[in-house]
Amino acid sequence: MVATVEDGRLVALRPDREHPLSAGFACQKGIAFTEVVNDPDRVTTPLRRTGTGFQPVSWDDALDDIATRCTDILRRHGSGAFGWYMGNPAAFSYSHLFAVMAFIKGIGRRSHYFTSSTQDTSSRLLASQFLYGTTMSVPIPDLTRTDLLVLMGANPVVSHGSFLTAPRIKDRMHDVVKRGGRVVVIDPRRSETAAQFEWLGLVPDSDAYLLLSLLSVMFSEGLVDIQAVVSRADGLDWLAAQAASFSPERTERHTGVAPDEVRALARDLVRTPRAAIYGRLGTCVGRQGTLTCYLIDAVNLMAGNLDRPGGSVFSTLGIAGQRWGIAATGAVLRRSYRRKRTRVGGFRSVIASEPAALMAKEMSTPGRNRIRALFVSAGNPVLSVPNGLELEEALAGVDLAVGLDFYVTETTAHCDYILPVTTMYERDDFALTFQQFQATPFRQTTEAVVEAPGEARTEWDIVDDLTARIGPRTAVFAALAGMRRVLGVFGRRLNPRALADGMIRLSDGGDRYGLRRGGLTFSRLSRSLPHGVVVAPHIRTGVLDEVVVYRGSRIKLEHSEIAAELTAMVRRGQPAGYPLRMIGMREARSENSWMHNSPLLMRGERVHRALMHTDDAQARGIADGDVVEVSSPHGCIALPVALTTDLVRGTVAIPHGWGHKGTGGWRVANRAGGVNVNQLMSSDPGDVEALAGMSWLTGVPVQVAGAVERVGGTP
Ligand SMILES: Nc1nc2c(c(=O)[nH]1)N[C@H]1C(S)=C(S)[C@@H](COP(=O)(O)OP(=O)(O)OC[C@H]3O[C@@H](n4cnc5c(=O)[nH]c(N)nc54)[C@H](O)[C@@H]3O)O[C@H]1N2
Ligand SMILES: Nc1nc2c(c(=O)[nH]1)N[C@H]1C(S)=C(S)[C@@H](COP(=O)(O)OP(=O)(O)OC[C@H]3O[C@@H](n4cnc5c(=O)[nH]c(N)nc54)[C@H](O)[C@@H]3O)O[C@H]1N2
Ligand SMILES: [Mo]
């Protein structure tokens, strides 16, 4: 973005024409961000909740009181009494990530750490941990070179990518077609992406069946290059045996996909030299998300498409000795996955993050290690996690709740303190977590372009000041204090910029701390190369030795956990009385729960609506625009419905992130209202995905009753 700043105020944002990859494109949310930065509803001083609402307080008062209460809770109950939910925007701020790490590791090893990952990516990460030995090796399609891109549960025309990161992603997909290739979209909805390319509709949450059939066709038709697979992977026979009984004829009743189409797709994936399947949110948040993600990679491997140009590839940063770093963290995370169990539900943790669906129960269930102090940063779990009402109640019951946000949201409204933070235009940044997911390897850093308004501060500075005030000196807090003192002698503040800088310097294009003249550093990028730099034209392939960290760099296909999930999938039934299946739906002018306060994005009286197939509506006497009741075994919501034929019959699509009901301080959002779709989702441990602790957000059984209110009057 190019920011126009006048008298210290951000007045406009426009896309950067000189950016090597976006070349003058930005999505509407990016342009509307001036309205977030300058939002009159923004929280810009620390707030303390009183009987009558929030009162501004000084930083010293807020942090002293929070620290005193933390000290007391830590002394009396230990680290297991602390929890932190870190939401999605944190992934886009390197200093925020390090701040939360420092706090949660510092407080002690029994603390509870939650992230949006269990609503998003944990299943994908765990599939990588199983297959390659580490959550850090996540393949993406080689977008700029592929000739057959199969998107499964992803809608990049609206989302602009997710794991796969590419500016102008829509144009890059059209390039595939222009060079004679194909883009196939497997989705229960003819999404905005499917509408521009080829659509293959399937029943929600049946992807694992489809993928098993692709494998079974590849094996039974002798399409797999056994030699090639065996040279890199163990467990091929095991996998073939697992897939054998899933012929396309047998899985059709689950997926709704005709056997001929499955066979054709299997053959195309093998015979097209440059082909890849890419799964995203839709394949991560079903009943068996880890299994589905595992199968996507298994199909890519069997089709000869893993780690090949134009296939499903692993972007490496080119850091010398990187493999050993990945291997070491991989081993630590694998061990913690095997050994640790959550208090409620006995779940294992992926990337050390517990299932957020169980956060409320971790606060309300009595016993040792019950959460008594909860911090929430960059998250609005009351709207984004299953059963927000349960979470609201639990929040009211804890001894201390602190939100780090720039809004009073449906979640922070229940906190004792809201601590104001900076937006991305008021801090330096580098997209640390996304470096490995860029279709074209690229580096860019930014400095703050405006001062933080009022008393807003970065998460790092807040955590740094808070931990300095907490009484018991844990080893991590003591180490931080030591570093703080040493830096203080030189008049500098402790901050994690050196870590982001180190990553830039050591990776492709970096200055290797002086060994490579003219190489990149954080400051050189932001000062001299503000548009960013492409560091390699393509993602390097032939890197399995670097990214697979099991002994001998061999991919491991056989896992008892995967077998158990297959059995569970086949046995799974559907609750009676809920014949429809609900899926999610992202909208171009929403960003999860938090951009509904931007007038620009909300223009045209936007309303929250469900999409339903015309035939399903007719069978229930429902007309376009009617307000209907959607119920699941776990809740019931009422909202207007729009009818369409762009859905597989039996599917209902409802966007998440709505349901602003006036507890939050965002006036535009509150007027837009809507309902919280996650009231229909289950927070029962039995409904949380068994392997990765994922919230179950797609393919959820629902019923839609006839109209409760008709446009222009009651029915
Ligand atoms: N405009 C906008 N962009 C965003 C966001 C936003 O809120 N708004 N959010 C950002 C975030 S946090 C993320 S994680 C990314 C997500 O990025 P994507 O995954 O690309 O985005 P979604 O729209 O969630 O796409 C999921 C698709 O899966 C389909 N689907 C649902 N269930 C199933 C299923 O069982 N099987 C299959 N095959 N498909 C299914 C849905 O119909 C939908 O089209 O988007 C990011 N970008
Ligand atoms: N039903 C259903 N539920 C879903 C999904 C779905 O597809 N369907 N998608 C899931 C996914 S993929 C995700 S990622 C989650 C997202 O859900 P959450 O992780 O809970 O995050 P958001 O709803 O994006 O809320 C972000 C909050 O952070 C604040 N914020 C923005 N920038 C910053 C910052 O720099 N610092 C701080 N401290 N705060 C900031 C915003 O004001 C907002 O209150 O929702 C999940 N929930
Ligand atoms: Mo997400």
Image (cartoon, rainbow, N blue to C red):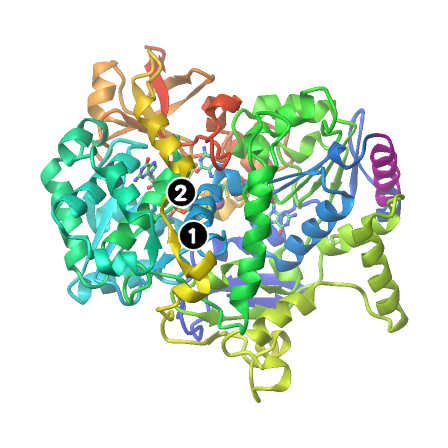
Q: Estimate the spatial distance between the alpha carbons at disc 1 and disc 2, rounded to whole Å.
A: 9 Å
Q: Secondary structure at mark 1?
A: loop
Q: Looking at the rendering, which quadrant does residue 34 occupy?
A: bottom right
Label annotation for residue 281: 2
Ligand 1, by image quadrant, is: top left
Residue at the outermost bottom position: 517
Q: Which of the two residues, 336 or 6, is positioned nearer the viewer here?
A: 336
In the rendered image, which residue does mark 1 sit on?
A: 162
x, y (%) of residue 60?
A: 88, 47
Q: Pick the residue in front: 640 or 655.
A: 655
Q: Which residues are magenta?
A: 62-76
Mark 1, Cα crowd under 10 Å, few <14 / some 14-19 / many 20+, is some
Image height check: is 713 above or below 199? Answer: above
**Residues at badges 1 and 2 in contact (C-beta under 8 Å)?**
yes
Crowd class of label 2 (few under 14; some 14 to 19; many from 20; radius 10 Å): many
Compared to residue 484, the image places residue 678 above or below, namely above
> Within 8 Å: ligand 1 and the Cβ of disc 1?
yes
Q: Amino acid at mark 2?
A: Leu
